[in-house]
Each structure stands twice: as structure tokens, then as C-alpha cells.
Amino acid sequence: MSGPANSPLNGRAAAAHLLNRAAFGPRPGDIDRILEVGLEAFLQRQLHPEPEQEGLAAKIRALPTVQMTASEIVLLHQRDRGSRASIECPLDDLRSAKCYRAVESENQLLEVMVDFWFNHFNVYVYAWEPSVPEYELRVIRPRAFGAFKDLLLAVAKSPAMTYYLDTFISKADRMVNGQLVRGLNENYGRELLELHTVGVAAGYTQRDVVDAARCFTGWDFGGWHAPVYEFRFAHENHDDGAKSAFGLELPAGGGVQDGERLIEYLAGHPATARFLSWRIAQRFVADDPPATLVEKCAGTYLSSGGNVASVLRTLFASEEFWAAPIRRAKVKSPFEFATSAIRAAGGTVSNAKPLSKALSDMGMPLYECKPPTGYSNRSTDWVNVSSQLHRINFALSLGSNLFPGVAAVPPSGGAEAAVRKFNRDILGAENSVTSAKHAGEVRDPGKVMGLLMASPEFQAK
Amino acid sequence: MSKRLTRRTFLTQAGVLAVGLSGSSTLLAQAARAANGKRETAVVFVLLRGGVDGLSICAPYGDAEYYKARPGIALPKPRSGGRALIDLDGYFGLHPAFASLEAVWREGTLAVLHAVGSYAMSRSHFDAQEFLETGTPGVRGTTTGWMDRCVGAIPGSAITEGIAFAPLEPRAFLGQEPVLVTENLANFELTAPGWRNEAERVLRQMYGQNNGKIAEIGRQAFSTLDVLRASPALRSLPANGARYPVSPFGSAMKQAAQILKARLGTRCVFVGHEAAFDTHSNQIASNEHDFPNVADSLAAFHRDLGKQMDDVVVVVASEFGRTVEEDGSKGTDHGTGGTMLLMGGPVRGGRVAGKWPGLAKADRHEERDLAVTTDFRDVFVEILRKHLRVENPGALFPNHKAGDAGVLR
């Protein structure tokens, strides 16, 4: 890796930069640990996730619906009909697992990428709540670092996506008694092109959208009465005519292969390579990522068969990622801010409900993004006066260890030691940041930590 | 240009200058008091995100093509029993869930504008919302929103001049002008039990002495605190027996009314509303579920403001209309020409405004969507010129030869 070695960032700053971008921020001691093993070794380890540590795994096992399929959750609901607890379970469990993992998991980059891909292939939790846990756990999580085409296909066939973007009710248009009866629903066909693969600027037409949608007619999850909700190709609903979608010609009679071939074609398209590289670079590097970096990543994407880990390696090895102006140039999203604050405070989450409420106040209710677009990766979109006030309130409460459901560890020693440790171990700063001077005027170390987490410097990553 | 910088600089420095002063004597509290009671006009821009089906809000039941194109989802003609349309003019009918607005229509201060939009719009939600909010159809990445440019062109320095009731800053307010973004004014307060004054003093110093976007927004947050703490009128109850639906949209409209009634120099209000408007399937049920909240919140706002509606224009818009024909799932897909609702004393109401293009295939855009006969920018320009008294408002919409849409008196 050429990047960090030639970077203008010194050791601590470089480690903090990497932990802010490839992880949910440093915990006390992380910077020293990473400097000891080396940044490259850390990245290698992150690209090869290990089984979750037992403490975290046990916490997640205690969340009943996280492991369940859509069918199992629906059955559970039918069994304890009327039990409010079980009806609210899937979303609460999902949020808990997400917060536990972001704060505690040693597989930090995996958690960042699961968050990234879920958002890229966003579904709204209240569209069909029981389908979402398996969507994250079984569709996205195992494919976060693999070939993009596998992820794209698994998403296309998932009950969550076939429901959310209406593929399950999209059927061939038919003539009945000389009258055209519409069956097609173009929702998924459009978003597949616009959001999932080539991007809105790729130059596709309305005709491409319609023919893309036709490819997926008959793709469903088995129907509401199926014993298990899983992908089914209902040939009787499929439009078997010839199709032409964004340059791919498909002869008549393709059946289920129409959709599979289109997905393979789109996943390998240079426009997809560029669009995904741009989105990944926007998430990890800068709101307006350097074109040179996007080109490098897109090159790797195409030469590696769309391998996500390879693209990430290219990104983290690039001089663009390690350039001095990139550091602290992005604002953390509310989720990144809150989890990085808990990590900075050496904290753990035991009840994610109050945290979820705080994230909603900051403008980012987890799993509740309604449109398929997902939440913005452009960090300035998260900055506004009331969100900022809610961030400050959260930080002050956490620093004093008063935030419900989260245990923080107030720094040992006095106020001065708290300032010094935060500077060195969390911000990775050589010199004291501007806010430290003022925070140090307060004598209580927990309050000092709260003020530093509320500071402008800590909002940036 | 210099005026814009002045307002911004004034606001962001005021939050710092207030350090150490008692809350009631800050510059901003003085500015708020100066604005207090002064009669000003305001625009409330309501964005229904998702692409609402305007042909279901106000259906052309007199057009035979309407029933041909939508055999499964067309609404029954007026007086045909059940959930039938409310007749407006013998040709158009209001969705029955909009019943609470019928009286406003009859009073003559509510208009429907059909076939509004732009051909440079896109059938992408994201693009079309961006184009509508920036006021630059066809141009991606415009760095300012039309409401930001409007606030910049209006004299005044209150932080409450531009307000968005939304979880995040909408692109309509993208740009340099400070804007108060909030979902709930009531919880806009610093909480640090037992040491709030101390925490606030330190935080004001921290944010005062840092550079960059976050520090600036933090300074604006403290300025906002100064204004809100000095304005008890913000907690006024709805007037005239108005009852808002208990919903995020109802709450947003109630707060919009509160801040307008408090007369804090507010000129541009944005209210975002996201419901299941993207009706690709089962549209009848979705609309029945979501429309009452929209209509009843608007009706409550109208009743609440009472006589003050003479100073207010509410524009309800969506990023695009939907296909004329229903799709294969008793829904409609993304279309082009859309629908606006305009409400307020200055509105030439009680009519369906604009040129109706018709629903016949040959009259549609690309044989598919309702055509566009009014450019949405002309509506904004007319409101800016006649209502907000902005000089040369056409200049705020580059590369557009602006005309009036004919929606105001």
C-alpha cells in the first residue's frame, strides 16, 4: 500500500483518519494498537472479517427476530396475535443489533459496508417489516465484500426488494377480448438502472426502463400463502417477448434468464463501475470525490470482475484518500456521530431505544428512510441548526454518563488529563484543538468529555 | 450580494456576541422584538415527496378518457353515491378525502393548478425533487435553492425569515442564507441539567472561535435559541377552533401557523411531507389513507390563521405527476405534468387554473403523461413578484424567460 507511507499525515493523524473512515471512529487506545500492528495489517484484517467476539455475539443472540426469516416472523406474529411486544420486535431488534455492532464489533469495515450497501439498496422498514432482518443478515451481510453482481442478484431475488419495489405484482401486459390489460409495474426496472447500477446520468430512456421492468415480470416471493417466503419465478406472469434494455438485446422466450442476464450485464457495465466507485468514494473520501480516484476505483472494479474488496483496497491505497485536505473534511452523519461518540467514551449500548430516538431527532431514524434513494452520503446534507443542537445535547448527556441505555466510562484523572487524552487518543491531534482550551475550563472530566464530543472538531471525520 | 453576506454575518456573529449577556438583551432578541407585530407577507411551500397523483386529488371526471385510462382506479362521478368526487365546476371533482377544503374552494381562496411542471424534469424522484427545489429544471447540482435565493433578495435579518419544518435542510433552502430547520420548535433547547449556563457559555466560545460550516451552523443555532427564548407567542394555541390532525404533517402546519402568528419576520416557510404518494400499486387505498391528513392539515391551517390568510400564500406541490393510464397493479407510474394547490387570500381561487391539455393519447406528453402547460417557475416568480414584492424575481431563475402563471389576484 503506497498511500499511508507517502501521506503527509503523521502516524497518529493517519491512524485517526483511517479509524474515522473505515470504522466508526477510535475508542481510547485504538490509535496506539493500530500503530503497533501497522495500518496495512489493520486494513487486511478488516477486509477479512472474523467471527464476532463472544460478548457481542451473545448480545445479538438475545435479540429474537434478528436471526429470523420473514416467514418465521410472520408465524410468530400470528401465534402471539395482539402481543404488542412481538409486533414491535423486528425494528427494535434490527436497531439494537446495528448499534451494538457499530459500537463493539472488531469487524468495523464490514459494519460500515453493510450500512453502505443497505443504504444503496434501501428498503423502508415499514413497507414489509418482517422481510427486513433476513434482507440485512442473509442477503447483504455475506456479500458486502464480494462480487457486486452476486449482491445485485441476491437483492433482486429477495422478498424484501421484490415487495418494496413492486416486482412481485408486476406481470406481462395481456390482450383479453381485444382489450389491453396492463400488468407491468415499472418501479423496480427504473430504480435498478437509476439507483442500483448505472445511475441517472447514464443516458437510459423510458423504453429501457420499460424493457428492464419486463425482464423481471414473474419474479416474486412465493405469494402470501406460501409456507416459506423465498424467490419464485412465476412463469405464467412473465413477459416472454423480446426485449432491449440499455443496449442488451434479449430474444423472446428467455424466461427467468431475462432478469438474470440483465443483472449480469448491468453489473459489468462501465457506467456501473463509475457510478458505484463514485458512491463509495463519496462515502469514504469526499462529498465531491476526486475524478482521478473514481477512475482508479472504476478501473479496479472492471479488472476484478466487480470485486468490492478490490475496489476498497484501491481506495485505501490511493494518494487521494491520504491527502491532507481530506482529513476532517467530511461531517459525520448522525449515526456516525453517535456511534463514534459512544466509542470515544469507551461506552457500550445496552438498550438502543433512547439512542434510536436521539438519532431520529438528529434527522436519521434508522431503517426509516422511505424512498429507495436511501440516506445521503453527502455529509453537508446532515448539517442544520436543530440537528446540531440535538448532537450537542446527546454529547453532553453521554459525557456525564446520563444518556439512558448507554454506559460511558468517564475519563480517569482530572479535567486536564481528560482534554489531553481526548486530543491524543480520539482526535489523533498533535496540538490541542481550538475547543480544548475552552472545555478545559470546566473541572469535571465527564463534562469535559461531553463538551469535546459536542465540539465542532468532533463533528468532522 | 453584499446584503446577503450582511444578513449571514450578522446572524452568525450575533450568536457569539450574546456570550455573557443575559438572554433578553441580545442583539437578536432586539431584532425579534423589532419584527414583532409587523405585518409581512409570507409563502408556505409544501412539498409532497413521492410524486403525488394530481389526477386523483382533482379528477377530470368530465373527460371520458379519464375512465377509459383508469378502469380500476378512477373515482366515481359526483353524486353517484359512496366515495364519489366532490363536484367543483361540472368537469373537475375533488377527491372525497379533500372534503375539508371544499369550503375554502367555495370561498374563493383555493385553486387547483393542473398540468404544471417542466419537460426538463425527470421521472426520477431524486432529480425531479432537486429540480423543483432549486428551480433549475434539467440542471443537476445547482448549489442554491429557490427559497434560499428568495430569502437573500428580501430585506430583513431575522433568523426566522426562512424556516423549514423537515428532518433535514431541504434543497429549496440550499445555499448561503441561514435557515431554521426543525421538526419540533418545542424541543429546540439546550439540555444540560444543572449546568446549562456553564455549558452554553463554553459552547458559544467553542463555536465562536472555530471556522468552517459546522461552527457557523452552531453559531446560528445559538442565535436561534436567543430568538425563540424571547418569543412566548410561539406557544400560542390554534385559533378559531382549528383542529390539526395528530401527525407529523399536522404538527408541521400547526407550527408554521404559530411562527407566522408570532410575526417574527418569517417570509419563506418550507414544509416537507413524505407519505405513500409513490402509488405504484393499490392507489385507491393509499390515497384514502394519506389524503385526509393533507387536506385536514391545510384546512386547519386556513382556519387557524383566519384573517392573516390575506398575507399568506400556500403552495402545495410534488416532484411530478403520474401516468395518465393505470399500471398493472391498480396504481400509476412516474409521469410528467403535475398538480399544485394554491391557497390564501391573494389566490385567484375557486377555479382550476392553467390550460387543461386533455387526457387523449395524442394530447399527452410522449403519449403517456399529462402534458405541461404551466412552467412551475412561473408560479414561483408570480408569487415572488406580486406577493413577496421581490424586485426582478425572474433573475432568481437563471435561463428562464419568466412570465406570470396567472394564479394570484
Image: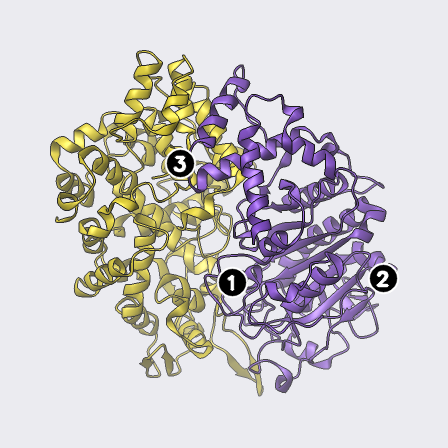
Q: CA distance from mark 2 to mark 1?
A: 32 Å
Q: Which residue is mark 2?
A: B108
Rendered shade, chain A:
yellow
Q: Amino acid at mark 1?
A: His
Is tag 2's residue or tag 1's residue first in the polypeptide sequence?
2
Pointers 3 and 2 within a single chain: no
Q: Are marks 2 and 1 in contact (CB under 8 Å)?
A: no
Viewer-side residue, B201 vs B367: B201
Answer with left or right where residue A433 lies relative to residue B361: left
Binning the other alpha carbons within 10 Å of mark 1 as few (below 14), some (14 to 19) or many (20 upward) gives many
Answer with left or right where residue B317 lies relative to residue A400: right
Q: CA distance from mark 1 to mark 3?
A: 30 Å
- The purple chain is B
Q: Secondary structure at mark 1?
A: helix
Residue B121 in view of the camera: yes
**B300 vs B280: above or below:** above
Q: Which residue is mark 1?
A: B125
Q: Amino acid at mark 2?
A: Gly
Front of the two marks 2 and 1: 2
Q: Which residue is mark 3?
A: A459
Residue A81 in view of the camera: no
Q: Are marks 1 and 3 in contact (CB under 8 Å)?
A: no
Q: Amino acid at mark 3?
A: Gln
Pointers 1 and 3 within a single chain: no
Query: Residue B406 location, x and y as percent?
Result: 75, 70
Answer with left or right where residue B215 lies relative to residue B75: left
Pointers 2 and 1 within a single chain: yes
